[in-house]
Amino acid sequence: MAPFIASATGKLLMGLSLGVIFGFTIHKSRMTRYETIVGLLRLRDFTMLKVMLSAIVVGMVGIYFFKDMGILKLSPKSALVGANIIGGLIFGVGFALAGYCPTTGIGSIAEGRYDALLGAIPGMLVGAALYAEAYTYLRNNLLQWGDLGKITIPDVLGWGFPYHWILIFIICTAIIVFCRALQKRGM
Amino acid sequence: MDWLKRESWSPYIGGAIIGILSWIAFLMVAPLGASTSYVRTSGMIEKIFASEHVKSLPYYLKEVPMIDWQWMFVAGVLIGAFISAWLSGTLYKKFVPVMWNERFGGSRGKRWVFAFAGGVILMFGARMADG
């Protein structure tokens, strides 16, 4: 099985299968709805935040567990302070206007949202093409600002195994306490 | 198998499944992501009209316009979400979201302009932040 998954076709099929389960799950989690996304930005519907936070808890615990077992390698992207902040702010503006995001927007098409199919998704393709043009110029300035390299929070704190589990415990506890508070308030 | 036909699940269950999928992706291939696939798709479309120009852009050398496993992941999302919506009987044909309609009215053209512009802006920002 392992050699097949490592083959080119195996990887493509793996991607497709993971995508099918992912798409099924985001639809069941109401993430494909415009109302869920804009509802969070208006602080009226915390569904999307709950999905993301529980994905972080489960994902973080598993990934660090497998990392400590030595069967998984982290692949952090470079922390580019300038590009992360400015890009994030630009993303937020577009995200609020469109009410769809690159991954969930595909699911929105699937459930019959024509403003995603004809508007938001073609817009994202145009945005990607425009960025491909801009990259030629940005790579020598904006993309160099505040490059901290491929760092993780445990790296910065100098907390290797087993101390990063203290940090994981603190983050998970904070998320659980926060979600319980949301539930208690009926949010 | 009634749970497959439910209109929605608890968001915490949904998040937990996504967390587990992230382990599998990490263990088997690489971290999950979708926005790179937009770059690859744009490149593949542009290549039809301006193949030389695409070859000259450094960004398309970094993110080569081709179908890779992440692209297949995005294709899978389309299929999975469709199956879920079909099983739960929530397939519809909507041009204007309900919440948008309540605030900005039912004009399809107006909604299209904002959805398109939002898409352009968000993807430009997402690629800049490398997300």
Image (cartoon, rainbow, N blue to C red):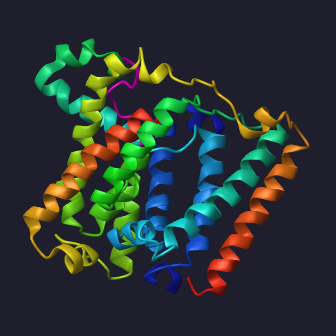
- Place of residue A123 in the rendered image (x, y in percent of width and height, measured from the top left): 22, 46
- Place of residue A122 in the rendered image (x, y in percent of width and height, measured from the top left): 21, 47
The correct choice, above or below, for B75 with respect to B95 in the image is above
**Position of the C terminus of chain A by quadrant:** bottom right
Residue B128 placement: quadrant: top left
Q: Residue at horizontal 42%, vertical 69%? A: A27
Residue numbers of the magenta segment:
B61-72
**Position of the N terminus of chain A by quadrant:** top right
The correct choice, above or below, for B19 with respect to A74 in the image is below
- Place of residue A2 in the rendered image (x, y in percent of width and height, measured from the top left): 65, 37
Does A179 sit left or right of A26 as displayed? Answer: right
Residue at far right of view:
A162
Q: Residue at horizontal 37%, vertical 40%? A: B125
Q: Examine the rendering and report whether any part of residue B93 can be seen.
A: no
Q: Residue at horizontal 18%, vertical 28%? A: B46
The correct choice, above or below, for A23 with respect to B38 in the image is below
- Place of residue A56 in the rendered image (x, y in percent of width and height, measured from the top left): 65, 56
